[in-house]
Amino acid sequence: MRHLLKRPRPLTFYLAALCVALTVPTLSVIGLMTWRFAESEKARLENDVNDINRGIVFDLERQHSADMAMLSTLATTPALRDGDFESFKAQAQALIAMHFHNAHIVLYSRDGFQVLLDVGKTLNGERLPPPVKVLGQDISNLERGATFWNSTYSITVPVVIDGSTRFYLSGRLPLTRLARIIREQNLSVGHFVSIVDRNGIILARSAENESRFGQRIPGVADDAPDHFDWTGVNPQGVSVYGVFRRLNFGWGVTTGVSQSLLHSPLRASLQWLALLAAVMIAAGAAAAWFITRIMARAVQTLEHKAHKLGDGEPIASPVTPITEANAIGQALAEASQHIREQAEALHKANVELEQRVAQRTSELAEKTSLLETTLSHMDQGLVVTDQNRRIQLWNARTAELLGLPPDVLVQGAEISMTVGFQMRRGDFIGTPDDVAIMYASALPPRQTLVHERERADGTVLEIRTVPLPDGRLVRTYTDVTLRKHAERHLQHLARHDSLTGLPNRVLLHEQLEKAIAMAQRHGIGFAVLALDLDHFKDVNDALGHAAGDRLLVDVAGRLKGVLRMEDTVARLGGDEFTIIQAATGGIGPADLAQRVLDAVSRRYTVDDTAFDIELSIGVALWTKKMTTPDDILKCADDALYRAKRLGRNRFCVTAPARGLRRAG
């Protein structure tokens, strides 16, 4: 209904819709009742077909039972037992005269091939040959003669004398007896009946008996179901609905009614329904046309008044045959007066509004110019996205800091375009949170989210993201590369020796804490070597502190040359060095100490002066009792002092289980 009211339509459309709304339900109810009546009539005709079928089946079975009873009685006559065929012939003639009519009775030998006695009348002067292969059956199929009127069927019973079969007694009965049963049903026009034998051969039929008997009806042979419904074309070429039933002695009865008769109630009902629909539609159309004329005149009057109202002319209340239209006209007249009053006020307001618009336009132009100037001269990059993460605002500094080409950073482009471009370039390596923040659907409004991103070219950007309450994002980009490099340099200086570049005492303690934790967790041992140059003060006194510094740099280089990548060498100050040997399972600490002695003891040349330097080393092996860096450093220092006391230029190893032992 709402769909109909969305688009304006002529008045005739709504009146036609009203006509349809009034007639369609009525016609639907009448059509339903007609259909149900037609279906009930169809069901009644189908029931009639079933009743006729059951009636003929009942009559045939009753007649067959009576025939078998009479023939069985004749088969037990004493004349046959005594061999008095003349007496038997007289009894058989009496039976034919009383019950069978136009039939004859044949007495066969036990093998069924010899006719001993033939009693009865011939059919139209024609004597039929004896039946073949009927012995042992209670009823035979069609025995075809020249015409329907002299064709027969047989019923056979055995003649039992002294407990054994001596003869067979067969009654040959005309097909007209079957046709009589069909005629007694008083079939109406359009109904058809056929009686068939075991093989589906027509024995008798309600119409055209002489031309149809002996024909086979497909689907009703001996292997057909005992009862079924069917639709199709009967032997006369008429489309029918049929019912088949098999009798208890093997024959079948098929009854049918023509499809045209079966569906005639529905066709007649549909014709009456069509006539009724035409009458109702015509009456509705006439009523709609009459009402449309009245309403159209009223609408034309209102339309004329509305045009005058639109031209600014005063209007009076119209008079039409419709009360509601008159009320609308009165409202239009009152509206005319209000419109004139409001027009004057509107003109005055327009003048004031134009003045305000001019003033605000000038102010907005100034602010826009200021905003563009600010954006173009900002040292920071700025990007504003809408709720769907499409770019609304940006400045040239953003493209410069992010290294984006002009075709990527454009108005209305999705932020995913810039993200994809930067991902392919490797800008987001190590900063996955950057993308997550950009695509997050629920961020706390007005809370500044700060993170850093290092681009592939080494540029470090500080990125601040501010979610707005309406779902938009404001993001700024600041180049903090110099500051980050300065911070990293200060951190390096705080953890490394300024002269040799080796780790200092702070970094050494951190590395020892990691080595102790690894040893406690995985049982991987390590060693610490404390080194001290012998008589280094003599070099400073003889050559100066600058030469001494160069000597320390050379010593640091030689120490790094004999260590593995996983080992650490640190300078603690002056001529003191410390080595952390990781994973002592390979080269032993003593072997490493000897290599260090050999490397450091080689001759040095400083300011064209050649001299030798000796070295004392203390080696400490980690044990489970050493839980802090100071514990193992103290053991290494003790071993170092022992090496000095023993004459310098040697190393001593601290044996955890036996105290100290001297080596080298």
Image (cartoon, rainbow, N blue to C red):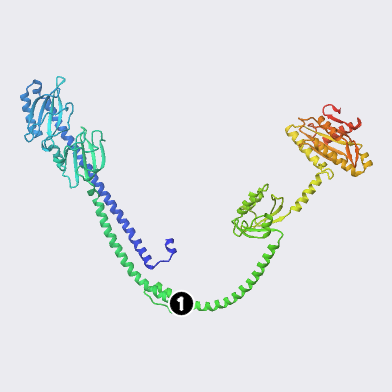
Q: Secondary structure at mark 1?
A: helix
| Residue 451, horizontal then vertical, whole percent | 70, 51
Residue 454 vs residue 228, the one in the foreground: 454
Up/down of 447 relative to 121, above or below: below
Q: Is residue 57 left or right of residue 126?
A: right
Could one spot residue 635 in this view of the protein?
no
| Residue 108, horizontal then vertical, whole percent | 12, 25
Residue 475 vs residue 459, the one in the foreground: 459
Q: Residue furthest right?
A: 542
Up/down of 87 relative to 42, above or below: above
Return the residue at label 1: 309
Q: Is residue 77 left or right of residue 342?
A: left
| Residue 13, horizontal then vertical, whole percent | 37, 65
The quadrant holding residue 561 is top right
How crowded is the residue under tag 1: few (<14 C-alpha within 10 Å), some, or many (20+)? some
Q: Tell me the residue at 12%/38% (across/down).
A: 148
Q: Is residue 73 left or right of residue 292?
A: left
Residue type for callout 1: Leu
Up/down of 265 relative to 552, above or below: below
Q: Residue furthest front?
A: 608
| Residue 146, horizontal then vertical, whole percent | 11, 36
- Quarter of the image for the N terminus: give it: bottom left
